[in-house]
Amino acid sequence: MKVFDTGNIRNVVLLGHGGAGKTTVAEALAYVTGTTSRMGSIPEGNTVSDFDKEEIKRKFSISTSTIPVEYKGESGDLKINILDTPGYFDFVGEIEEAISVADAAIIVVNCKAGIEPGTVKAWDICEKFHVPRLFFVTNMDDDHASFRQLVLDLEKRFGRSVAPFQIPIRENEKFVGFVNVVKMEGRKFTKLNQYEAAEIPDYVQKNLGIARNALLEAVAETSDEFMEKYFGGEEFTVEEIQAALRKSVRTCEMVPVLMGSGINIQGFNVLLQVIDKYFPAPDEFETVGIDASNGERFTAKYNSDATLTAKVWKTIADPFMGKYSLLKVCTGTLKPNTEVYNVNKEQMEKIGKIYILRGKENIEVDELKAGDIGAVAKLTVTGTGDTMADRNAPIIYHGPQISKPYTYKAYRAENKTDEDKLSTALSRMMDEDKTLKVVADPGNRQSLLYGIGDQQLEVVASMIKERFNVNIILEKPRFAYKETIKKVAKVQGRYKKQSGGHGQFGDVIMQFEPSGDLETPYIFEEKVFGGAVPKNYFPAVEKGIQEGTEKGPLAGYPVVGIKATLLDGSYHPVDSSDMAFKTAANMAFKDAFMKCQPVILEPIAAVKITVPDANTGDIMGDMTKRRGRVLGMESIGQGKQVIQAEAPMSSLYGYSTDLRSMTGGAGDYEYEFVRYEQAPGDVQKQIVDENAAEAEK
């Protein structure tokens, strides 16, 4: 593939609900531009972007794929870097990485399905990062698809910025062409994506008039000159309309609506024309970072003649493809066989060959100019979010804003001999997917794998098996309960063992009571008079208490809030030892703990749930069932409410799946630990019984 200048590049991300047709759109664009010789299909598992075995098996996208295509635009050849993202919410990290390097977005909407939660999420992420966008309506070949109704719904949901650039032409209920609202000309499809001029049917005149008037009003609002012209009754030229619309699309004041059929490969020539005419090139933006040498804000245009800076937005760590760092060149030109400085890691990296990735295919290129997206292989220390630059101009760009994972499961290798292999596999997976996180939980003797949702964790387990030949077991975790006491008890711990020769002897009398400090496992004091227990055994007594708090007698959870006071005891000049006094103290601890009204403390989380207005009742009712307390509710506009609540963390296990089920995928939540509270009696009994059953096993 040849090298393209910054002004002839378009970086376009495909967004939308799962199953809306994003991968089919990407496939059609690759086909009609001659990038591929045949149209792949998801059922057959031969699309360019869904090449991973898991994607082929599950028939949906799991990671973002790059598909660069060449297109002969009005003013010269274009390179369009298509970023095909997953639609399912568990893989939102892939979307967040892609949006960080995209200059425009195509939100794909299934005409028959209409606005879905993924449509709204796509719009929201474009609003958040101020990304120019258009709607591409698929499935126009479906007889029951109503384009007019969908446009009304889009306008109602997203406002007056939504503007149809086309009106469908149907004959005998079949989608056969469209009216170009900008040029006011009819078009009929001839062969697949090709079309010819056609008369505008009478039956579309009403809807065409509405769309045309809205378009002209938008054009008039772009300047005082156009406003005068509009109110003076003068006609705008096509060139004036296109120039004004381009400005409006660039500033996100207008969102065009186009249409097509992926299966019949219809409508993609127009989509390519709109990408060419209305979507911005990288050199129309500024890149913003921080100068690491002085901490000051750095801004620059995407300019190939400047000093090199580039940001790594995604990592591929596949055992078969190898490791690739996908990057976007921000300033300067990236050349092969050079050394660059990783500003984040403060280390030099050797750049070998430079590639562009088209699905799983790597294509070597001579260089990458500012604004372009490519890849380099086998970098040593570089990861997602790092900035590459000249050592004398150390600029740092912000990495992708990645969602925090809240869903988790305990994990372990099926075979203990595979633990090292599993550790390596998870490290590689976390290099690729920044929403994955491994957390050690020594208090409960388990390791936890965090992700966005259960489906993602299931996919990760399957990928680890496929790529690294390791079986990983995912299971319900032990929750971070703690144990404490409510009353005071005075007990004796006496350890005596005689087995020939020196024996073992330790004897302590101790008082145990609540310390009032649930942040600390125990407080140890001694009030021994007259040397009944020699001072040199005090550390051993404390060690016995410490070991006892690591695994509580009630249900095996860590103990907190204990005050242990050594009052008295006795010793043997020959048989006493540190080990004997440690054991005696541990025996006293266990005896006293069960006499001091032991209770289980459960972790409580502050939960923030964002849901559509229509779902608030269901969410609050469900939260009550989870023993949660709703603290308040606040409207944030756009038909959404934020519910503030507190709930036991154990009740939030699996909440991601349940919330999506209740809201059709439109709900989000986050939580953080706030404190421990005593668990209700029935819950305590259940926890104790479960622990006993587990111990028996």
Image (cartoon, grey):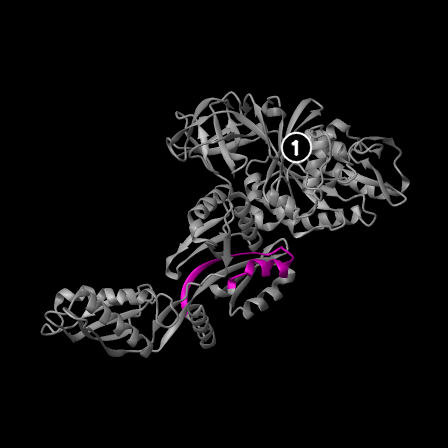
- Residue 249 image position (x, y, % from top left): 66, 36
Q: Amino acid at mark 1?
A: Phe
- Which quadrant holds the N terminus? top right
Q: Is residue 379 left or right of residue 584?
A: right
Bounds of the magenta segment: 652-677
Quarter-of-image position of residue 246: top right
Quarter-of-image position of residue 514: bottom left
Q: Residue at position x 46%, y 23% from top? A: 307
- Residue 31 image position (x, y, % from top left): 72, 32
- Residue 97 image position (x, y, % from top left): 54, 40
Q: Is residue 639 above or below residue 219?
A: below
Which of the pair 385/408 is nearer the observer? 408
Q: Is residue 660 magenta?
A: yes
Report if residue 221 is visible in the image: no
Which of the pair 522/491 is nearer the observer? 491
Q: Is residue 10 magenta?
A: no
- Which quadrant holds the C terminus? bottom left
Residue that mark 1 sits on: 279
Q: Secondary structure at mark 1?
A: loop
